Amino acid sequence: MQFIDEASISVEAGKGGAGCLSFRREKYVAKGGPDGGDGGDGGSVWLMADEALNTLIDFRFQPRYRAKNGQPGSGRNKTGSAGEDMIVKVPVGTTIIDEGTREVLGDLLIHGKQLKVAAAGYRGLGNTRFKSSTNRAPRKTTPGTPGELRKLRLQLKLIADVGLLGMPNAGKSTLLSRVSASKPKIADYPFTTLVPSLGVVGGDSDRSLVMADIPGLIEGAAEGAGLGTRFLRHVARTRVLLHLVDVAPLDETDPLDNVGLIENELLNYSAAFAERPVLVVLNKLDLVSDAELAAVREEFLEVYPQREILCISAVTGAGLDAMVNRLQDMVAELKERIAADEKAAAADLELQKRIGNDVMAQSLGVVAPASDDDLLVGDEDEDDEDDDHDVEVVYTNE
């Protein structure tokens, strides 16, 4: 199945049924009076998260959704039947954005959760409603109101605790296959991974976490080189970024330079990623000597003194247990801090909103490149007040 993580759809709720103009007409009943019934309410359109879905491809072929209209009222004070609601299933992790107002209407993060995206039209009133002591035979009715019409943009963001970054052929797919039951495609050529993959790490323990393998970035990705930044929205929800580094790249490039290139492209996408914790993992230690590995690690420590540097071999399994334990500790510490500290929770929510703004800006073709001061090199924490995009996303479901 083709992986589609963004789609535009239009939704229209049903209109309300019209009220009825009717008078009672029966044998032996003189001047029976008004008996026109109300119309029925229209149906609303709801989106519902379904864990059985993992792509938005269906919305490419069916982009329009319309709920049923309410039926008009009739004589003998009969109310028209209400229109049936339409429930549209979307993958868990879908963000819903109103393309007209650019408001984020909500995030469907839990299986079965529903969100009303188009409100139904109200019923019209029959002439019985307008009967009074001074108006015994009203001929007034009201039509039903139209249902809400909206054009929506759906964006699927995978829900993961750890996002994998790294150059093509850094070993991300191999690593995911070794620490989880995921079976991504693995080959010895760049861009083997064409779509994101998820794997549950430590699934038999209470400290299990979800890891996302994001297709590799290269220099110029923000301008469309390689696979571009198309899939970077899937690291928007991650708590920790794991930067996997090939210590013995086939093209003989400098591993340190490669890290700078990747993180520069990441910040060109969203400068807010600078605030996410990053764990640097040097991979393929089985291909270099101990002295060469120590030299590479020393170089990284000089440039990234605030980061942890781990060494592994995804092929042989060396160092994987220590890496998994450290990731579990980092994710658990972040979750506990957010749960216990309201300020930390508010800061995390604000960070997610900023990344969401940048995701929306990228999807609309509005790119705000990061300045040189925004680079993650050295983990310097510098405030940048001039990194606002031209697109503002307003969250309405707080």
Image (spheres, grey):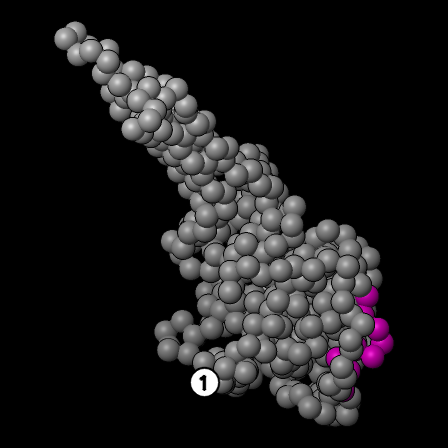
Question: Does residue 183 appear anywhere in the picture?
Answer: no
From the top left corner, tell me how far across and down residue 31 is, in percent: 24, 13
From the top left corner, tell me how far across and down residue 44 is, in percent: 43, 40
| Depicted 232 relative to depicted 40: above or below | below
Name the residue located 65 percent from the left edge and 59 percent from the top edge.
393
Q: Spot the residue most to the left.
A: 28
Q: Nearer the viewer, residue 379 or 95?
A: 95
Q: Quadrant of residue 283?
A: bottom right
Tag 1: amino acid: Ala
From the top left corner, tell me how far across and down residue 29 is, in percent: 17, 12
From the top left corner, tell me how far across and down residue 156 is, in percent: 56, 54
Q: Spot the residue most to the front.
A: 134
Q: Nearer the viewer, residue 95 or 300?
A: 95
Q: Quadrant of residue 207?
A: bottom left
Judging by the rendered image, the residue that carries numbered circle 1 is 340
Label 1: how many residues lie within 10 Å, few (<14), some (14-19) or many (20+)?
few
Q: Nearer the viewer, residue 76 or 129?
A: 129
Name the residue located 78 percent from the left edge and 70 percent from the top edge.
387
Name the residue located 42 percent from the left edge and 59 percent from the top edge.
110
Magenta residues, start to end: 369-378
Q: Nearer the viewer, residue 87 or 157?
A: 87
